[in-house]
Image (tube, rainbow, N blue to C red):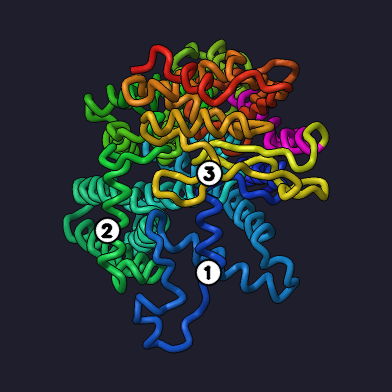
Amino acid sequence: MKLIVRWQPLALWGIALLGFLLRIYGLDWDQGNSFHPDERQILFHVTALSWPKSFAQFLDPISSPLNPHFFAYGSFPLYLLAWLGSVLVHISPTLGTFAHLTLVGRVLSAIFDSGTVLLTGWLGLLLMRDDAAGDRFCWYVALLAAALVAFIPFQLQLSHFYAVDTMLLFFVTLTVLGCVALVNTNRPLRFALVIGLGYGLGLATKFSAAPLAVPLLVAALLRWYRRDFFSAFGSLVLAAAATIFVFLVAEPYALLDLPNFVQQVSEQGNLARGMLDLPYVRQFAGTIPYLYEAQNMLLWGLGVFLALAACVGLVWLLWRAWRREAGLWAVLLCWVVVYGAITGSFYVKFMRYMLPVYPFLTLMAASGLVAFAHYCWDGATRATARVAPTIFVKNPASWIIALVLAGTIFQGLALLNVYSTPNTRVQASRWMYSHLARGSVLTYEQWDDPLPVAVDGHDPSEFMQATYFDANRQPATGLDLYGDDTLAKARQLATLLPTLNAITMASDRLDKSIPRLPLRYPLTIRYYQLLFGGQLGFHLAAHFENHPHLFGIMLDDSGADESYSVFDRPTVRIFVREDPYPYTSEQLLRKLLQGVQ
């Protein structure tokens, strides 16, 4: 009977389980080819880790095999996967291979993101129970928010990569939950330790968790206002001490290899602010801060319906804060505003940078929807609110709630459906093995992956990658299209193209980002115009793309941020040489330079 009466906790756990099942669907989406560069980089460092032979070696940052010498991300994700791999290898040696360890990491990513679903529901309960008017509806908000987070398209996608984003989100959510609980709890030491654990592991996952100091400070101030100064100050000090301790345990070489740590973290900060000119961030040239992130979050990250509801919920909460009625929501609000203001100002605007605000915006949307439904009740309905679930049945506002939930589920499942078909690079590789002659000379674009990949027993060595000497007279493969436009680059293209049988484009990252810099790349833009127009002696022989789709409805996300599609479902093109080849190198050079200054 207790289980029947208290069905809500079981429903919350059921939603988290459903979220986990969704997140492990199609987990081997790249068939062991490691198409995600960040995931690949992490796995390279994980497989290089080993335990020091002595404590003295552990303390030596140069010789210690436990030092990853890699601080673009924190060390905790590396150590966690390496430890888990060392355990699994005793069960079966094959589990320690690069490909199997990648799958293990993706399962971890799915587990952490499913944990975020649970934490979101729990956080909803804490926030609503603090408000006397909202206490009656706390489970509605908790379950609605958890269900929405379970189907958020971007979280479903990131759970398929071991690239620390879902792990960071879990620790951010845990820390904010601890801050909310700290305000009113009779056991402040317990939740101070929870905050220290979440904050410390968040920093050891990615240093971008640093602004969590703001909600911690706000929580301490609220506890001082509601309780007493000494309790608030003691909790703040304990949480800070626990954070430092946990961080140094999970990432010891942040201290032992401090100069390298500071240098790499500074480089990541300079990269985010646009102070480092690297090819893979040139896609953001000309993009507008805040607006670019908001657009991608609206259309693809949260999904249209949830993002609109979150926007309304955020405005409603800001209005309540202005009237000093926000209560515990002030902790969430300060995190969303401060983190969003800092991250939204960056030159580099990868969608994953804004992930740490997703569950909190979802909570604002859920609370706003339920509050609107409550507002629409008539007096008679309010009188029976404690026992009648008419909020979701007879209330016209329930249709809005159903629309937001159904829309989010649709976009989430449409995104998930891309994993029901082979990766576009795998499809392209199969086409190449069956349509191109063995020994054909191919080329690809540098800063992207070469094709084909190993699949169905075939090996890329069946073809030859064109080799040439670069500006330093060193042998190189792939077209250096991100290189500066010079006359030497034009001559190199004109000389190389007649020797090729096919040009492969494993994604559209270059042909989309380079045209954003017309003054820098007039020659390369001209090259793409001629290639796509069939005027370089090559024709488009094969084209592969895979967009989110469900029930015959396709969502064209070609205008989304590059990182939303370039890893797990890029647009792939294969251009094949015409026979006989119609141009000489001199003719090609004149074509490439025509009208180019």
Question: What's the distance in space between the residues labelled 2 and 1, CA to CA?
Answer: 21 Å
The kind of residue on which mark 1 rests is Ala
Q: Earlier in the sequence, mark 3 or mark 1?
A: 1
Which residues make up the magenta segment? 407-433
List the residue tagged with mark 1: 48
Q: Which residue is mark 3?
A: 468
Residue name at image x 50 percent, y 31 percent: 493
- Residue 42: image location, x then y, percent: 51, 57
On whether residue 422 falls in the magenta region, the answer is yes
Residue 287 vs residue 19: left or right?
left
In the rendered image, the vertical position of residue 469 relative to residue 403, given as above or below:
below
Q: Quadrant of residue 282?
A: top left
Q: Residues within 10 Å of mark 3 (few under 14, many from 20)?
A: some
Q: Earlier in the sequence, mark 2 or mark 3?
A: 2
Residue at 62% x, 49% y is 34
Residue 452, placed above or below residue 318? below
Q: Amino acid at mark 2?
A: Gln
Q: Which residue is mark 2?
A: 263
Task: Between residue 157 and residue 170, name the one nearer to us.
Answer: 157
Q: Is residue 364 left or right of residue 100?
A: left
